[in-house]
Image: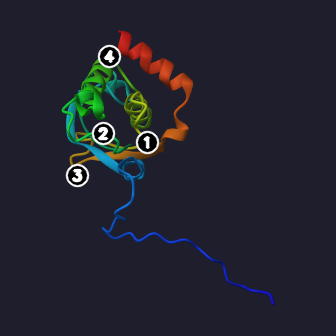
Amino acid sequence: MNSNFKYYSLISSGSWVPENLPENEEKANTTYKIIITDLVLRALIGIHPHEKDKRQKILINILINAPHNFNKNIEDINEVVSYEHIVNDIKSFVKKGHVGLLENLAESIVEICFFDKRVLDVRVKIEKLEVFKETKSVGIEIYKTKNYSSDSSKKKILKLKKK
């Protein structure tokens, strides 16, 4: 007899967790989000001549996904992905000089986030706030997973951190 049925194992997406599930297995499949909302900076950004010597206001929003494998009984910043370090590194990078495209700035921000090996994926949205008087903002958004982070990216970020 030929069967056209496939059998799948299903796990409920509800809140029930089996009582006999070891704590470390439960955490291995759990993630948490690091949220950086409405970081406003003045940046040298753009391809036009007037954008190369005058800073303009940009708005940055970042959503980072990381594994939830920290111990709730330990109050140590090293146990989590630090939004403080990420924000400070972005501010330092933006202060360094001119970037032509928002897309390139977003890629650099992703690399900064991936500097922490625990980061699984990153969503970055950057908006220019002063381009057109008829709009509140114009901008871009990118999403990258850890698979796209390369060794050359890490070397670039190490150079950034040393300066």
SS at badge 3: loop
Q: What is the CA distance from the residue labelled 3 to the residue labelled 2?
A: 46 Å
Which residue sits furthest right? 1
Q: Is residue 47 visible?
A: no
Amino acid type at mark 2: Phe
Frontmost of labels 3 and 2 is 2
Q: Position of residue 159 (x, y in %)?
A: 43, 13
Residue wearing tag 3: 134
Which residue sits furthest top? 163
Frontmost of labels 3 and 4 is 4
Q: For residue 130, what is the image quadrant?
A: top left
Identity of the residue drawn at 72% across and 85% down:
4
Amino acid type at mark 4: Lys
Residue wearing tag 4: 96
Q: Do labels 4 and 1 touch, CB within 8 Å?
A: no
Q: Can residue 142 be seen in this view?
A: yes
